[in-house]
């Protein structure tokens, strides 16, 4: 499975969205992506990609697209 496929799967299993919704998905853009949903997603990201996100990056992870930029800082190319 590619990094993109894994990344998408994390969102698709964490939130009730369709793949076509992902490019425009934003933090607090849906009810389920609240602070608890965000921390669950961040934890899953760290586990799947074998990284430890900094607090600043967790706070900056504000959308599906922004997440790609943040993961690239950790060597995870999406």
Image (tube, rainbow, N blue to C red):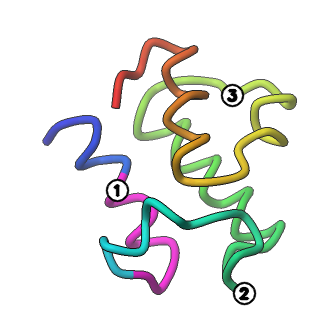
The answer to whether 1 is drawn above or below residue 57 in the figure is: below
The answer to whether 59 is drawn above or below residue 41 in the figure is: above
Assign a secondary structure to mark 2: loop
Residue 41, image quadrant: bottom right
Picture coordinates of residue 47, whole percent (x, y): 49, 39
The answer to whether 38 is drawn above or below residue 65 in the figure is: below
Residue at x 23% of width, y 49% of height: 5
Select label 2 or label 3 by which is in front: 2
Which dot marks residue 53? Answer: 3
Which residue reaches farthest left?
Answer: 1
Asked if residue 16 lies in the magenta stretch, the reply is: yes
Assign a secondary structure to mark 3: loop
Q: Which residue is mark 2?
A: 31
Give neighbour class at mark 1: few <14, some 14-19, many 20+ (Cα, 10 Å): some
Q: Is residue 21 left or right of residue 37?
A: left
Residue at x 32% of width, y 73% of height: 20
The answer to whether 3 is drawn above or below residue 64 in the figure is: above
Query: In 3D space, how far apart are the residues under numbered discs 2 and 3 (Cα atoms)?
Result: 24 Å
The magenta segment is 8-17
Q: Which residue is mark 1?
A: 8
Picture coordinates of residue 66, whole percent (x, y): 61, 41
Question: Magenta: predominant secondary structure element?
Answer: helix
Which of the two discs, 1 and 3, labels the residue nearer the N terminus? 1
Which of the two discs, 2 and 3, labels the residue nearer the N terminus? 2
In the picture, which quadrant includes the N terminus? top left
Query: In 3D space, how far apart are the residues under numbered discs 1 and 3 (Cα atoms)?
Result: 18 Å
């Amino acid at each position: 499975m590619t990094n993109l496929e894994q990344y998408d799967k994390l969102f698709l299993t964490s939130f009730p969205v369709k793949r076509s919704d992902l490019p425009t998905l934003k933090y607090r853009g849906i009810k389920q992506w609240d602070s608890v949903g965000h921390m669950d997603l961040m934890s899953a990201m760290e586990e799947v990609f074998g990284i430890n996100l900094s607090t600043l990056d967790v706070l900056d992870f504000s959308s599906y697209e922004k997440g790609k930029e943040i993961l690239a800082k950790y060597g995870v190319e999406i």
